[in-house]
Image (cartoon, rainbow, N blue to C red):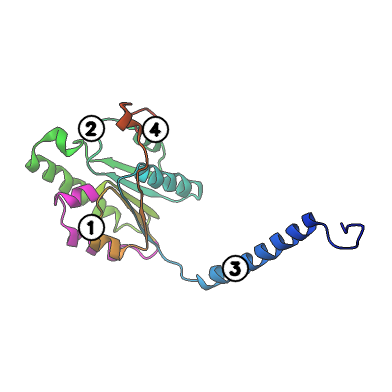
């Protein structure tokens, strides 16, 4: 409202400035949305030392199920212990869930065994990447298997390039190889600021397990 002198109150001026900023921002966002007209499956890579890579991937599994989509999941490295996500998502007939079953590499301490297990898991993953019925394929901790060269990077890249046109793929794990980062449409590098484990707090159900 105007002041007694007929000039706008400071609150009104700030509100007008805010509306103008939001109007300009909306115009920019609307223009970018209109320009993003391509429709195809995307490749996402979630990497870095920070927590939340797999959690983010499984959030996308839940989102896909909400849209009635079929999903394939292969867990590399993990699988020796039952996780909350495995227990939950296996309840859904729309989800094909496969865990490698050998646990982390420092638990087996047997490279040949790890290679066999990882390559068997990759065969399952490769079949999923050929299946047009699957709208989303999550390859959890595949980056670890690539880092230790349990699975051939060129074989993985070829499978990702030739997957069905509308199929999305999500790959998680620390140390994503440069070739995979180059191929990906979206890459998130999660950094760590603090972690409870460093303070002596063990893995918690619902948080890490």
Residue that badge 2 annotates: 80
- Measured in 3D between alpha carbons, the distance from the residue under mark 4 to the one under mark 1, in whole angstroms, is 27 Å
Q: Nearer the viewer, mark 2 or mark 1?
A: 1
- Measured in 3D between alpha carbons, the distance from the residue under mark 3 to the one under mark 2, in whole angstroms, is 47 Å
Start and end of the magenta stretch? 143-166
Instruction: Describe the element under mark 2 as helix, strand or loop.
Output: loop
43 to 102, vertically: above or below: below
Q: Which sits in the foreground, 133 or 152?
A: 152
Is residue 146 part of the magenta span, yes or no? Answer: yes
- Measured in 3D between alpha carbons, the distance from the residue under mark 1 to the one under mark 3, in whole angstroms, is 35 Å
Q: Which sits in the foreground, 50 or 95?
A: 50
N-term mark: 3 or 2: 3
Quarter that holds the N terminus: bottom right
Residue that badge 3 annotates: 30
Residue that badge 4 annotates: 207
Looking at the image, which residue is at 15% across and 36% down?
A: 106
Q: Nearer the viewer, mark 4 or mark 2?
A: 4
Mark 4 closeness class: few <14, some 14–19, many ≥20 residues within 10 Å: few
N-term mark: 4 or 2: 2
- Residue 177, label in figure: 1
N-term mark: 4 or 3: 3
Q: Which sits in the foreground, 23 or 138?
A: 23
């Amino acid at each position: 409202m105007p002041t007694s002198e007929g000039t706008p109150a400071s609150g009104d001026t700030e509100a007008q400035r805010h509306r103008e900023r939001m109007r300009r921002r909306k115009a920019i966002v609307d223009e970018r949305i209109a320009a993003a007209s391509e429709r195809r499956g995307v490749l996402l890579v979630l990497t870095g030392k920070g927590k939340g890579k797999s959690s983010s991937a499984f959030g996308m599994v839940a989102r896909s199920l909400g849209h009635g989509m079929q999903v394939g999941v292969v867990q590399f490295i993990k699988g020796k212990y039952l996780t909350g996500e495995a227990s939950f998502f296996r309840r859904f007939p729309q989800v094909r869930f496969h865990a490698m079953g050998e646990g982390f590499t420092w638990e087996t301490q047997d490279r040949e065994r790890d290679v066999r297990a990882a390559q068997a898991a990759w065969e399952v993953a490769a079949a999923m990447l050929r299946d047009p019925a699957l709208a989303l394929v999550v390859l959890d901790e595949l980056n670890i298997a690539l880092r230790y060269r349990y699975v051939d990077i060129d074989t993985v890249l070829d499978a990702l390039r030739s997957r069905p046109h509308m199929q999305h793929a999500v790959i998680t794990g620390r140390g994503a190889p440069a070739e995979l980062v180059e191929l990906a449409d979206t890459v998130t590098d999660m950094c760590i600021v603090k972690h409870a484990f460093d303070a002596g707090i063990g893995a918690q159900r619902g948080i890490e397990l």
